[in-house]
Amino acid sequence: MEKTLNSPQQSANQFNLDDLSFASILRDICRNFLLIVLSAIVFAGGFYIAKNESFKPQYKSEATFLVSTRDGSFDAYSNLSTTIQLNQVFKMILDSNALREAVKADLGLTELDATITASNVEETNLLVLSVTASTPSDSYKILCSVIKNYPIFSDEVMGNAVMDVFDAPSIPTKPINSVGGFKAAFLGFLLGGILMVAAVIVLSYLRDSVKNERQVERKLDTKLFGIIPHEKKRRRKGLLISDITSSFGFREAYNKLRSRIEREYSRKGYKVFAVSSTDENEGKTTVVANIALSLAKKQYKVLVADFDLRNPAVAKIFELEVGKKEFTQAFDEEKTDDIEKYIISDRKTGIDFLASSRNIDNINRVLRRGVLPNIIKRVKNNYDYVIIDTPPVAFVSDIDDIASTSDASILVVREDYSKTMAINDSIDAMTRTGTPLLGAVLNNCMVTSQGLGYAYYGGYGKYSGYSKYGKYSKAEGSSGKEGKNEG
């Protein structure tokens, strides 16, 4: 099934709600939390420094006058009325710039960089004159000049007013404004954090990966075969549905996946299934293990074959004692016709295994000899189901040889992990083998159609081993060890 992929330019110009995954955004914010905090700190420091560098202190000098009438009347109402009128006159004089010009001439200034105000104390006959300037001395000198020149203008308008000094002016000792560095730093911290979060959101949206179940069939050249939700890793073992601490939703997801596999058997007779993924860390071994466990619980006779020969993990996730039953010994001894003696029967799970605890260096020679198909042909008639764990498609070409041994294949896709193009390349590689691809299992799904998934998958760092693949060990989309999800 071919899908028409949008060009980068079309993708940039088209907004699709499916690409805006809040689960992915939240995960990216958590992953980049330290970077967000660092950005906020850098902005906070920059704002603090900028505020201090641009700070201009302002100093205010004030003088308070007691206003009365020249006729010596002690009528409080008359004095209050006179004070109010005098304040209005003062404002009128300031608006005309007459007083300011007189002060400049008196002090020999070309510019008067100061703010001159007058205000009356409410319900009193006190008038306050104030001057705000950039230095203490300027504010004091200008106020003294205002007091000296003010009567010249006020007497012409209100000759009946008398101003007696109630509180003489003085040189201010500290600015009336503050630097506000900490406030600026706080604003910078918020801005830096918000900008970095916004950048994370944009990059999360633009990242071309499969972010939710709706995107599987829209972006990939296959259908959705199953959904596995998040499951919190509670101990240093694989995420197995046989663990009594596993959640109901996790177990039920594998029961649904098992039912679909049973349906494929009843409809088409498929009994050998190859499970792969595009990259390491996508959880294919965990999916293999739990499919087998779910089938075994229904009393099916199940064989799990670990054909990921470069990095076998099945024995580790099931904690098998392989010992002399390393089935890869048959390659060296050329005794694949007697492969049954290497099968490990696990009484605890009821599953049989072809497992290995060591890597195979001469894998290409083994594949050329057609050993793996011969093994499956010999054993599959003894089992109801055979589940094969294969290597990641992006790293090796083993899938071409291994797929021919199976009736159908399944691709495990970890949510918001590998790039869509790489996944589709893997799908093409799997379908070219001629083996039917049943679809993609969306693994590690944080939000499903049934609501929130379960807690974050822990790490299985001990299952790593793909670093030996040379240049592929640093392939984009691969991080950490094989088994954060996979086991």
Image (cartoon, grey):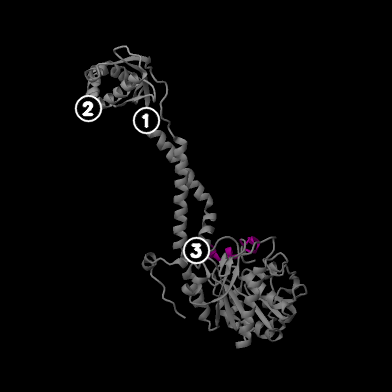
Q: Amino acid at mark 2?
A: Ser
- Vertical arrangement, residue 218 with respect to residue 66, above or below: below
Mark 1 residue crowding within 10 angstroms, few (<14) / some (14–19) / many (20+): some
- Horizontal and vertical percent position of residue 132: 34, 25
- Vertical arrangement, residue 12 with respect to residue 254, above or below: above
Q: Amino acid at mark 1?
A: Lys
Front residue of 431/181: it is 181
Whichever of callouts 3 and 2 sits on the residue coming sooner in the sequence is 3
Q: Is residue 470 magenta?
A: yes
Q: Toward which corner of the image does residue 170 lie, by quadrant?
A: top left
State the SS at label 1: loop
User: Residues in magenta?
Assistant: 456-475
Residue carrying label 3:
21
Residue carrying label 2:
96
- Vertical arrangement, residue 67 with respect to residue 447, above or below: above
Q: Residue at x 61, y 77 (%)?
A: 366
Q: Amino acid at mark 3?
A: Ser
- Horizontal and vertical percent position of residue 199: 44, 55
Residue carrying label 1:
56
